[in-house]
Image: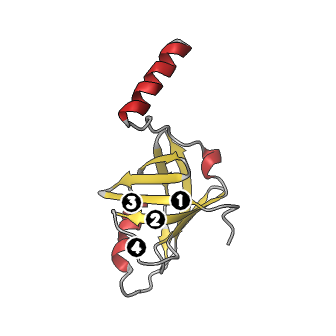
Amino acid sequence: MTLARTLAVALALFLAGAAPPAIPPTPGQLMDSAWRVTTIDGRAPVSQRAVIRFLGNRLSASAGCNGLGGTWRLQGSRLVGGPFISTMMFCEGVMEQERAMADLLGSRPKISIQRGLMQLQGGGHRLEARRLPGASRP
């Protein structure tokens, strides 16, 4: 495709209000990053501590109560993780979102990153998160 044609297609998509197609992230976009969860299944997280972290080949996540962790890698546009281990405390009001997050991460979800927003979708669940500045270490 020529540069002029590529620009024409991009302009047509922009004018039509269409977003460009999502490009699968690279491991470098996730390595040593932390993401504040903004929605789980279309709802705001019930805890301000809902976060996903990628540190080396390890992933840790929490909806605000229990910790979930395991290994991760990218396979095309899928986040492949596990086996995951989790703490098992009961926290009033958080458990539904914790189960959704665990089911999602265990389902080899589709992953995309655009403009600092990560989207994960799979296992009947959808999660959005914004990249936190700096390294993922607390």
Q: Going from the N terminus, do you reach mark 1 or mark 4 first?
A: 4
Q: Residues within 10 Å of mark 1 (few under 14, many from 20)?
A: many
Q: Going from the N terminus, do you reach mark 3 or mark 4 first?
A: 4
Q: Going from the N terminus, do you reach mark 2 or mark 3 first?
A: 2
Q: Residue at x 33, y 62 (%)?
A: 42
The reply to whether callout 2 and callout 4 are in contact (CB within 8 Å) is no
Q: Nearer the viewer, mark 3 or mark 1?
A: 1
- Residue on which disc 4 sits: 98
**Which element carries disc 3, helix, strand or loop?**
helix
- Residue on which disc 1 sits: 130
Q: Residue at x 36, y 79 (%)?
A: 95
Q: Residues within 10 Å of mark 2 (few under 14, many from 20)?
A: some
Left or right, 67 with reference to 107: right
Q: Going from the N terminus, do you reach mark 2 or mark 1 first?
A: 2
For the question of whether residue 116 can be seen, the reply is yes
Q: Residue furthest front?
A: 15
Picture layout, residue 20 above or below residue 28: above
- Residue on which disc 2 sits: 38
**Which element carries disc 1, helix, strand or loop?**
strand
Picture layout, residue 99 above or below residue 6: below
- Residue on which disc 3 sits: 104
